[in-house]
Image: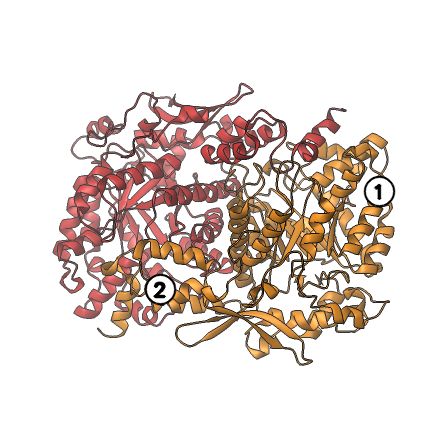
Chain colours: A red, B orange
């Protein structure tokens, strides 16, 4: 763990505040104080780390905010989907309603009943394993703020546990709504435990990676038993959602293998290899109801993996991809039958003109279950800049209705991200998600932009920094040029050519 | 000028090649040699700098590729629009036809006649001042590759001439199709001269900046005479296109001044102030025909400035913005009457859901003249990342039909860009423009992506680097993790979890 303080809201003119729901649940937010006396509350993923007094101690873990609610529901606690369908508004639902609304005008605020209805109808999920009470409730659905996920995790080539916790906290500091631990190297269990006990956001995994480690990395030796044991282990640990590639079937393979870039999903390629070797159907498909039976006991959400997502513009929207998507739709209905919450994973590499078709077919085939996409990347030749290549597609598909965007870092296709890459990736995706919120007209989404624009027009530089998604960087760039933030012009145009200054002088009749 | 070699194609497995048109005109391109023996020709903006033998010498200037053509047309040389309308295919038109087509399949190639027709009908321009024969012909129009512009130029706060030339060459190295010199500091004339004599791409300016310097920066003292003299000076120097804010009228001001961020165009604010002070109509509007008469003598293209582009999400698509756009449409017809080539400048800050309306209205109001937009930025809170905030909007509006995208750097709203910022901004915009070309289905646009994807699937790492828009960065990121590029996996997943390797092994029956 680095010595410096990872979280320091004060530096950015902010504090962690709590607003209470009608039944008294405290919902954490970040409040930015502006120089003109205004205060603006914004969505915040920092959790307890946003508290000034809180000293980070990964060995101890963070407080368990949901512990009482889970205990209150007793041993027979059900999934959020079950409660929603049975007309019960859980504390989690109440929490997210207030969390989503922030300072929206009263008549536009999201109600707990609206949350319940969205969850009940499968259009949104609240990932919240009973065994992960550290999570602050959050919701993933197209009628809510667009969320982003940051992937972390070691590989055989690098990183250790402390570095992974730090990456997770770092991702959360910059605004990641969930993190996925994609570790494939050593100490998978310990790494995951450390992450789960230290993050206030839902954690996702791809269990087949660990299952494969259990059979020494030999794909042919994978068994349903090894996989199922892994699921149980991870359910008990508190993982909130699993990527499960149960929709990849033998019939999809001929088309997939003849593509320009074949199969680019790790999980997908593993299962394809297994099926070809054993000449048997995907065991995740065969045992899908068993998986649902297990997941519902812990309320682990299903993230149905797109093993056949296109890895190149040439393969976008092909028969293999959409064939699998249809199967994911069938599986969605089965999971819902078991009251298991579901999201659907999506591409990949897709040119802009083919993005909307992805969203439309996903909604149609998967009965409105939330979509969770990786980008998509809108071209193939942006290596070294693929956070941008993918943010373009991500913003668009977010606007079209995708509920959560999985970030892509500058290192995509090339190497594992380091700390700086995680920050760059997360902030880039916050921009994409926020742009989508604006385009969708999410209640109150424009408030922060409006305050930012007013601060610009007033030359309140400190407020501009603090209202930015990355205050540190904005401040740094400005001060490198101007050296103080008390001037009524910027470093781009200098004092004599400031359009806003001239514009104001006209209005004021100077 | 930095000591290291700015351009070195060999390092990226490439060479400068020339393809000949039917009439023998040599068109420069970059050819990338792949490890599998294939060669792929790509659009190249480096000009003579791409030649291995060429030694950069800013004092000497670069060869004048268009000199003979211009001289051949004699003293009465006309604008490209005039020739096009009179059925004449100029060498410039022939050049761009081949330059745009690259290796596209024969039946999809762009013909010189198609170029002529697009120019004749005002849907495209070839910016090519007779006095700037250093320019390699290029075309801006929605039925051609989407182009990008990089702004450079000093301000009162920083930079000198050498640094500006270097920034211009640097921008061209990374793929800028035109550069705009927006200098407002000292040595405006000399800086521009140095840039013009050293770049193989069209150069644009905003003449009002220099006109204002001529009256010691006192807006009230601006006169048509001072402005007109500036135009003559810059026409003679060889500037290829001028941003002229002639569409900003007094009637637009009340609405503009009541916006959240007022007027954010420097030129726009200057003219607004002048109009308010003198209580007179915009002198650029009054003297518009005189401007056209002058510009057509040199074939300087008009870039009709959007003085009222929105500077915030709150101001997007408002009455002020679209009111001015309508006036730009009237002016377009007048310019065309004089055979002056025209492009139209566009926003600014626009949420994704309002971008298409901009494109549609621009086409309608401005009779199909090419659109040239700044971004647009899809939210206001991305300070420090506004190359990304704006690339999202740029890619989208490029797909919808914008012909040229003006880059925005990471420093936008905060400071002037340095060398690294220019590189980051240009490559980001190459991605946006290329994504738009793919989405529009430009002939041959997918070739490079296809070769990249094949190189990925074959683990030809060197080819992947060389096919990237920034080979240096791609190589650096990969080698930091892997240390050699002769492996059949990548640093993200490590050797055991490479999806593409597994996928190939299935296909090969391993």
**Could you tell me if residue A279 is visible in this image?**
no
- Mark 1 or 2, which is nearer the eye? 1
Where does label 2 land, which residue? A323
* B407 or B106: nearer the viewer: B407
Where does label 1 land, which residue? B226
How far from the left and from the top, in percent, is residue B490? 31, 59
Residue furthest to the bottom in view is: B22
Q: Quadrant of residue B132?
A: bottom right
Residue B365 falls left or right of residue B316: right
* A326 or B491: nearer the viewer: B491
The span from disc 1 to disc 2 (Cα, nearest Å) is 67 Å
Q: Quadrant of residue B380?
A: top right
How far from the left and from the top, in percent, is residue B42? 54, 68
How far from the left and from the top, in percent, is residue A60? 20, 29
- Label 1 resides on the chain identified as B
Q: Residue at x 33, y 63 (%)?
A: B485
Q: Quadrant of residue B27?
A: bottom right
- Within-10-Å neighbours for mark 1: few <14, some 14–19, many 20+: some
Q: Secondary structure at mark 1?
A: helix
- Label 2 resides on the chain identified as A
Q: Quadrant of the N terminus of chain A?
A: top left
Q: Secondary structure at mark 2?
A: helix
* B110 or A257: nearer the viewer: B110
Q: Residue at x 29, y 64 (%)?
A: B487
Residue B19 falls left or right of residue A161: right
- Within-10-Å neighbours for mark 2: few <14, some 14–19, many 20+: some
**Could you tell me if residue B53 is visible in this image?**
yes
Count of marks, rendered view: 2
How far from the left and from the top, in percent, is residue A445? 50, 35
């Amino acid at each position: 763990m680095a010595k410096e303080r990872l979280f320091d809201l004060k530096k950015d003119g902010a504090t962690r505040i709590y607003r209470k729901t009608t039944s008294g649940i405290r919902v954490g937010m970040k409040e930015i104080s502006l120089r003109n006396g205004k205060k603006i509350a914004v969505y915040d993923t920092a959790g307890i780390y946003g508290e000034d007094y809180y000293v980070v101690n990964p060995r101890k873990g963070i407080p368990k905010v949901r512990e009482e609610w889970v205990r209150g529901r007793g041993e027979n606690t059900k999934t959020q989907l079950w409660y929603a369908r049975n007309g019960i508004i859980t504390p989690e639902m109440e929490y997210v309603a207030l969390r989503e609304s922030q300072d929206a005008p009263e008549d536009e605020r999201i109600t707990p009943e609206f949350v319940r209805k969205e969850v009940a109808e499968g259009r949104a999920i609240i990932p919240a394993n009973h065994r992960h009470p550290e999570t602050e409730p959050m919701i993933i659905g197209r009628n809510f703020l667009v969320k982003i996920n940051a992937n972390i995790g070691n590989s055989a080539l690098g990183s250790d546990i402390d570095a992974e916790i730090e990456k997770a906290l770092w991702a959360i500091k910059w605004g990641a709504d969930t993190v996925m631990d994609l570790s494939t190297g050593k100490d998978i269990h310990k790494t995951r435990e450390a992450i789960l006990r230290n993050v206030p956001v839902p954690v996702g995994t791809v269990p087949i990676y660990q299952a494969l480690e259990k059979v020494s990395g030999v794909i042919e030796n994978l068994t349903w038993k090894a996989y199922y044991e892994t699921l149980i282990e991870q359910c008990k640990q508190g993982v909130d959602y699993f990527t499960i590639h149960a929709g990849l079937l033998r019939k999809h393979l001929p088309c997939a293998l003849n593509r320009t870039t074949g199969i680019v999903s790790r999980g997908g390629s593993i299962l394809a290899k297994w099926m070809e070797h054993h000449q048997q159907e995907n065991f995740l498909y065969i045992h899908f109801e068993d998986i649902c039976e297990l997941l519902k006991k812990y309320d682990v959400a299903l993230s149905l993996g797109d093993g056949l997502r296109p890895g190149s513009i040439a393969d976008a929207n092909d028969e293999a991809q959409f064939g699998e998507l249809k199967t994911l739709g069938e599986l969605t209905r089965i999971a819902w039958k078991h009251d298991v919450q579901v999201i659907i994973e999506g591409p990949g590499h897709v040119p802009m003109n083919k993005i909307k078709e992805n969203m439309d077919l996903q909604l149609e085939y998967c009965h409105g279950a939330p979509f969770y996409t990786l980008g998509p990347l809108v071209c193939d030749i942006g290596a070294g800049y693929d956070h941008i290549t993918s943010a373009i597609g991500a913003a668009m598909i977010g606007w079209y209705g995708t509920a959560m965007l999985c970030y892509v870092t500058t290192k995509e296709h090339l190497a594992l991200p380091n700390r700086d890459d995680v920050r760059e990736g997360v902030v880039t995706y916050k921009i994409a998600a926020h742009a989508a919120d604006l385009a969708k007209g999410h209640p109150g989404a424009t408030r922060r932009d409006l305050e930012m624009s007013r601060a610009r027009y007033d030359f309140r530089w400190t407020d501009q920094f603090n209202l930015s998604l990355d205050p540190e960087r904005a401040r740094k760039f400005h001060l490198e040029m101007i050296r103080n933030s008390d001037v009524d012009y910027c470093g781009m145009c200098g004092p004599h050519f400031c359009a806003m200054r001239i514009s104001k002088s006209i209005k004021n009749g100077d």
